[in-house]
Amino acid sequence: MTLSLKKQFHNTRNAFVEKCKPLQVEDYSVQPVDFVSPPKWHLAHTTWFFEQFVLVPHMPEYSCFDKDFAFLFNSYYEAVGERVMRANRGLMTRPSVAKVFEYRAHVDEHMLRFLDSDVVLEVQSIIALGLKHEQQHLELFQYDIKYILGHQPTFPHLYQDENLKDVSTSVEFLKIEQGLYDIGYNANGFCFDNELGYHKVWLEEFQIANQLVSNKSYLKFIEAGGYNKSEYWHAEGWDFINEFNIKCPMYWHQIDGVWFQYTLKGLQKLNLNKPVIHISFYEAWAYCEWSGQRLPTEFEWEVASFDFNWGEAWEWTNSAYLPYPNYKKEEGAIGEYNGKFMVNQMVLRGASVATFEEHSRPSYRNFFHPQLRWMYSGIRPIKKHE
C-alpha cells in the first residue's frame, strides 16, 4: 500500500501545481470576498496539513520550513492553535508566491522520503485523508479562481470550456417505490466520517427528474418574474436576494438584451441547453416552488442516483447537514474535519465538473450555507404529490 500511497501523493500534489500554471503572479493573493481564499493560501494550507499532521509528529528528524506558517495557513483547527482569520487571508502579500512553492517542495521532498519508510496503518489513514483534503481544495480553488477572474471587468480566459453536457429538451421523471432503504457508505475503501454510520430510512414513493434543470427552463422562471414574487421564496431567501439585488444566477450578465455567462473560457453567450449552475439553495427552492415541484431530500437523491446520470453540478437537496445515527467524530484535531460544521448548512449530493473522480460516489455528502452560489450547484426536482 505504501508504494501506491506514494504514487497518489505525487499525482495529487502535481495536479495542484499544474492547475496553477495559467495564473499570473498577481492572481495568487486576491481575496475579493471572505468565502473565497487566495490561490496562494490553498497551496500553502494543503502543504501545512501534511507538515502538521504527518511530518512533525511522525518524522523525528523533520524541521519545520517556517515556524510562522502554522499560524498563517491553519484553516479552522482550533486544537492546533491560533490562525489568521479567513476574511484576512488576502491581506498576506508575504510570504511570496515563490516562497510558498519552496514550502511545497520542502514538504514534498520529506513526505516522499517518509513514504519510503514503513508507515503504520494509522498514519497511512491520515495521509489518505490529507490527499482527499487536497483534492477538495483543488475543487474549491477552481471555484475561487473563477470568482476572482469572473468579477474582473475584462472577464479573463483561463482554461478551456468547463465541459458541461447539454440537457435534453424533454424531461422524464423516474418513479422510485416506497420502501425501507440503506443510506450511507458501506464498502471497502476511503470515505469521510460524515458518510457513516450506515442506516436505514423509510421513503414514500416519489418521482425525480432524470436530468438537471436547464438554463432555458431557469430563464423562464426569471422572465416570469420569479425574482420579484415573494411567494416563491423562503423569508431568508427573499431578504438575501433583495439585500444583494440578485436577479439571476451568478456569472449571468444581460448585455443589450442578450444573456451571457462567464465561464473559465471567458464571457460566452448563454447556452440554453446547459444545466443552470451557480445558484443558491434559496434560488433552487424558489424555482421549484414556481414550477410546482420540490427539491429531493438527500436520502431520496441517494436512493434514486443509481437510476440517472449525475456529476455535472452539485445538486441541492432539502436536507439540513446533520450527523447520521451512530456518527462518531474522530479524536483530536482530525475530528474537526466535518463534525463541527453540522449546523446551519444544507446538503448537496453528486459531484461537479471540478470534482475528483474518486470523490464521486452516491454516499458523498457535500455541504454549504444556503446563500452560497460560487460553487457548481444545480437543481434536480421532484414532482409534488397532486
Image (cartoon, helix red, strand yellow):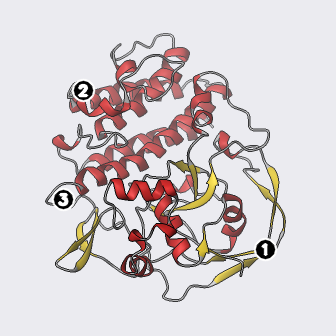
N-terminal-most mark, 2 or 3: 2
For label 2, the residue is: 99
Give the answer, above or below, for where 55 lies relative to 259. Answer: above
Q: Residues within 10 Å of mark 3 (few under 14, many from 20)?
A: some
- Disc 1 is placed on an element classified as loop
3D distance between C-alphas at marks 1 and 2: 57 Å
3D distance between C-alphas at marks 3 and 1: 47 Å
The residue at the point 31 percent across, 59 percent down is 245
Give the answer, above or below, for where 211 lies relative to 329. Answer: below
Q: Which mark is residue 319?
A: none
Q: Is residue 40 left or right of residue 281?
A: left
Comparing labels 3 and 1, the label whose residue is closer to the camera: 1
Q: Is residue 102 left or right of residue 82?
A: left
| Label 3 with label 1: CB-CB less than 8 Å | no
Residue 329 visible at all: yes
Which quarter of the picture shows residue 86?
top left
- Disc 2 is placed on an element classified as helix
Q: Residues within 10 Å of mark 2 (few under 14, many from 20)?
A: few
